[in-house]
Amino acid sequence: MRESLLKLNCPYCQSSKVVKNGKKKNGSQNQRCRNCQEQCRASYCYKGANLALKLLLFRLLEQNSSIRDIEVITWNQPKMYAG
């Protein structure tokens, strides 16, 4: 087995026995802890801190857009989420 250069500790049990376990639907690498069997990602981008996204959401809410409309609009703009 090939060892990863990035050393990741499990966020649940702090074990260093973390291995690759496929990919998520969005393409991010999925990791699994061999100690507690929990799954996690190596990196996580908190999208709530994205200023451009916040401004877009406020603009859509001011225009009385429904939650479903906002979801459709924001998920169709992948460049909006690039960190």
Image (cartoon, helix red, strand yellow):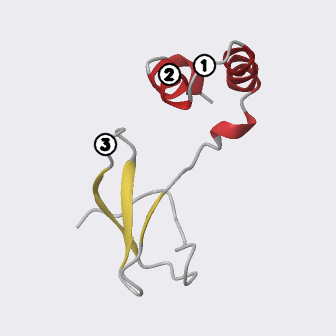
* Residue 23 % position (x, y): 30, 49
Q: Amino acid at mark 1?
A: Ser
Q: Identify residue for label 3.
A: 25
Mark identifier at residue 51: none
* Residue 18 % position (x, y): 41, 72
Q: Would residue 62 be found to the left or right of residue 18 on screen?
A: right
Nearer to us in this view, 13 or 55: 55
Query: In the displayed structure, would residue 34 be above or below residue 25?
Result: below
* Residue 14 % position (x, y): 58, 81
Q: For the residues marked 3 and 1, what is the alpha-carbon distance in whole angstroms? A: 27 Å
Q: Secondary structure at mark 1?
A: loop
Q: Identify residue for label 1.
A: 65
Nearer to us in this view, 71 or 81: 71
Nearer to us in this view, 44 or 5: 44
**In contact (CB < 8 Å): disc 1 and disc 2:** yes
**In contact (CB < 8 Å): disc 3 and disc 1:** no
* Residue at left offset 77%, top offset 25%: 51
* Residue at left offset 48%, top offset 21%: 78
Question: Which is more N-terminal, label 2 or label 3?
Answer: 3
Picture quarter with the C terminus: top right
Q: Amino acid at mark 2?
A: Asp
Q: For the residues marked 1 and 2, what is the alpha-carbon distance in whole angstroms? A: 6 Å
Q: Identify residue for label 2.
A: 69
* Residue at left offset 41%, top offset 76%: 38
